[in-house]
Structure formats: C-alpha cells, structure tokens
Image (cartoon, grey):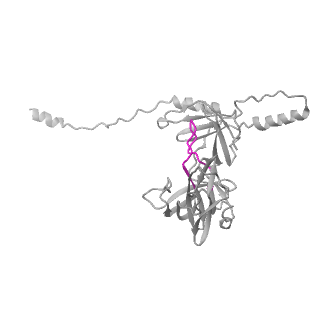
C-alpha cells in the first residue's frame, strides 16, 4: 500500500493541447500527487508521533521521565489518511535514506498497533466459526517492526502466528529465511487426530519468514495450551492463556508472561470487520491535540514548567545527641 515518495519530485507537467492527453495527465496527477493525509497525532509514554496534512511527520520524544518534550526534524511519509483505516502501510522516508520504509499498522478506536494479525480462512476452513468477533481460526502476523523511531526501525527476527480452536491454542514461531516465499506450501501440527495447517513461509514488507527447516512438513517450534475469552465491565475483551506444552527450544515466552505464574492475560482488539486482531496493548493512542500549532504550544508550555527539585540520594538523618546528658557529663 505504500506509495512512491513524490514529495521530492516535480509534479508540474506542461500539458499539450490534446484533450485526451490532458485528461490522462490530470488523472495521474490527481491519483499520485493528492495522497496528503488528514492531520493526526499519536502518543505513548515515550513519544508523540505527528502526521501532518502536508505529507510530513515528526517525532517528539519525552525523555527524562517526561520532564522535557524534545522535537526532531521532519521527514516524509505516504500512505493516505490513517484516521479511520484498519490496515495501512506507512511509507516513511527517513533523513539520509533513499528508500521508503513501509511499516504495516492496524488502526482501531483503541489505538495504533504494530504487532497485529490477520485472520486466514484458506488453510483451515473447517476450523473457522462464523460470528461476530469469532476468535477461532488461524491468524497470520502482519507487522514486523517494533516501533516508529527517528531512523529506520530494525526488522524483527521472529514473529508468531496463532491458532485458536475450541479451548486450545497454538502459538507458532516464524523466523527470517533466505528461501523464496511459497505462499501455497503448508506445514502442520497434529491435534486430536486432525491436522492444523500453517503457511510454510510468510512475507511481511518484503521479508520472508518460515516455520520449518529445509522442506519439513511438520511445525517444530510452537507453544500450546488452553485459552478463554474474558469480557470486562466496559465491554472490553481479554484473553486468558495457560501454556501447557512447548515444542522446540527456540520458542520464547510471551513478554507478558511472568515466570512466577502459569497463565497470563492479554487485551484483545478487533478491527470492525473482525479480520484484523491484536493481542496486546496499542503501540500508540490518539493524543488530544488537533493541530500542529497546538502541538507547538504544548511543547513550549511543557518545557517552560519548573520541575520539582530532585530528592537527595541520602535522606537526612534525624539524630538525637542527648544534649542534656552531654551537659551533665561535662559538669
């Protein structure tokens, strides 16, 4: 979905007098030069991420425990209006870089997600259950970047696919490979006499991942256990996961799992059509700032505030020298 970087190109063309050619060129200019997105700004405890309506964006960091908002030079982006989208690839052109970096994102009312999944009904059609926000089925990872940074974020070395069926789940590890992508090839896990199929390779933003070695057909590295969907008082959804089996030493524990407990709970965010899913908190949430000028004012006001003095490294001791006893001994 990423569009070519046209910010640095000239979009003025001398039109001839031929009506057909004029119409064709005007159509091209409209299609490729008017991708400017609506203004939006997002934040987390570490940074603001601002998308301007002129095709530029910037990052404002919150270092020193949020005592300073530090802004950095703008860079270019493409990808259209992300405010109302559910899947979008942000095409970011970082300073000093020639190529556009496409970063897949999922956008919901809950925020902006970089770690998210897409439901795939092609590999296990008999396991999928119809219904609103049905969690059962196979979900393929769509994102492979950990953050929106000041320079190109590194590609994740591994990603995980999920499969939910009845009360069991499988979390399958994929790692980077140099083999070509073969989207129709399948590998499987056998459960209860049935084969559960996973794509042998995945492609995410030009990077190929695999879940098997060489040409094996059996998935080697996965976590399996029980799951339960929970509903909160405000309608929010969570999933409780209880791992029971790990096959292969290369499967990492989920970051949310504590080594001191057997199960762990993750928030669940669906897209409005139930196709995209994220298991975890959003990377960014919408900020209550409506314009770039307002953002500049927020930075100025925040940085002009006086900070409370730091606490001393050593707390002062309340010493009692018993001066009355000292005076008595002096006599």
Residue interval drawn in magenta:
140-160
Across and down, in percent, residue 10 comes to: 74, 28
Q: Is residue 153 magenta?
A: yes
Vertical comparison of 276 with 34: above or below: below
Q: Is residue 271 magenta?
A: no
Residue at left offset 67%, top offset 48%: 87
Q: Which part of the image, by quadrant, shows the C terminus?
A: top left
Vertical comparison of 118 with 293: above or below: below
Instruction: State how many labels appear.
Output: 0
Across and down, in percent, residue 102 comes to: 64, 42
Q: Nearer the viewer, residue 99 or 331?
A: 99
Q: Quadrant of residue 13?
A: top right
Q: Which part of the image, by quadrant, shows the N terminus?
A: top right
Query: Furthest-left residue in view?
Result: 331
Look at the image and tell me whether residue 73 can be seen. yes
Residue at left offset 64%, top offset 30%: 293
Across and down, in percent, residue 212 comes to: 57, 58
Q: Quadrant of residue 33?
A: top right
Q: Nearer the viewer, residue 220 or 20?
A: 220
Across and down, in percent, residue 98 comes to: 64, 33
Query: Furthest-top residue in view?
Result: 14
Query: Furthest-front residue in view?
Result: 214
Q: Nearer the viewer, residue 72 or 145?
A: 145
Residue at left offset 11%, top offset 35%: 328
Query: Main SS of the magenta segment?
Result: loop
Look at the image and tell me whether residue 228 can be seen. no
Q: Quadrant of residue 8?
A: top right
Q: Is residue 190 left or right of residue 307?
A: right
């Amino acid at each position: 979905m990423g569009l070519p970087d046209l910010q640095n190109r000239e979009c003025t063309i001398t039109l001839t007098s031929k009506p057909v050619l004029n119409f064709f060129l005007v159509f091209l200019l409209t299609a490729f030069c008017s991708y400017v997105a609506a203004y939006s700004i997002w934040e987390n405890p570490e940074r603001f991420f601002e998308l301007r309506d002129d095709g530029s964006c910037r990052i404002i960091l919150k270092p020193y425990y949020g005592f300073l908002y530090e802004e950095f030079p703008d860079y270019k982006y493409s990808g259209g209006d992300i405010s109302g989208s559910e899947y979008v690839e942000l095409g970011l052109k970082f300073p000093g870089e020639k190529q556009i970096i496409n970063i897949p994102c999922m956008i919901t009312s809950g925020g902006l997600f970089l770690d998210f999944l897409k439901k795939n009904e092609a590999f296990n059609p008999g396991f999928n259950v119809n219904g609103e926000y049905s969690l059962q089925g196979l979900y393929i990872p769509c994102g492979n970047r950990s953050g929106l940074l000041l320079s190109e974020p590194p590609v994740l070395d591994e990603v995980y696919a999920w499969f939910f069926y009845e009360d069991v789940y499988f979390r399958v590890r994929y790692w980077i490979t140099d083999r070509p992508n073969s989207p129709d090839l399948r590998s499987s896990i056998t459960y209860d006499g049935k084969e559960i199929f996973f794509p042998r390779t995945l492609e995410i933003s030009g990077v190929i991942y695999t879940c098997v070695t060489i040409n094996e057909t059996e998935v080697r590295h996965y976590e399996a256990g029980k799951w339960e969907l929970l509903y909160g008082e405000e309608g929010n959804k969570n999933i409780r996961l209880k791992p029971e089996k790990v096959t292969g030493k290369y499967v990492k524990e989920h970051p949310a799992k504590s080594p001191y407990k057997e199960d762990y709970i993750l928030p669940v965010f669906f897209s409005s059509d139930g196709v995209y899913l994220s298991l975890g908190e959003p990377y960014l949430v919408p900020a209550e700032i409506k314009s770039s000028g307002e953002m500049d004012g927020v930075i100025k006001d925040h940085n002009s505030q006086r900070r409370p003095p730091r606490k001393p490294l050593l707390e002062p001791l309340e010493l009692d020298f018993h001066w009355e006893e000292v005076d008595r001994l002096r006599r």
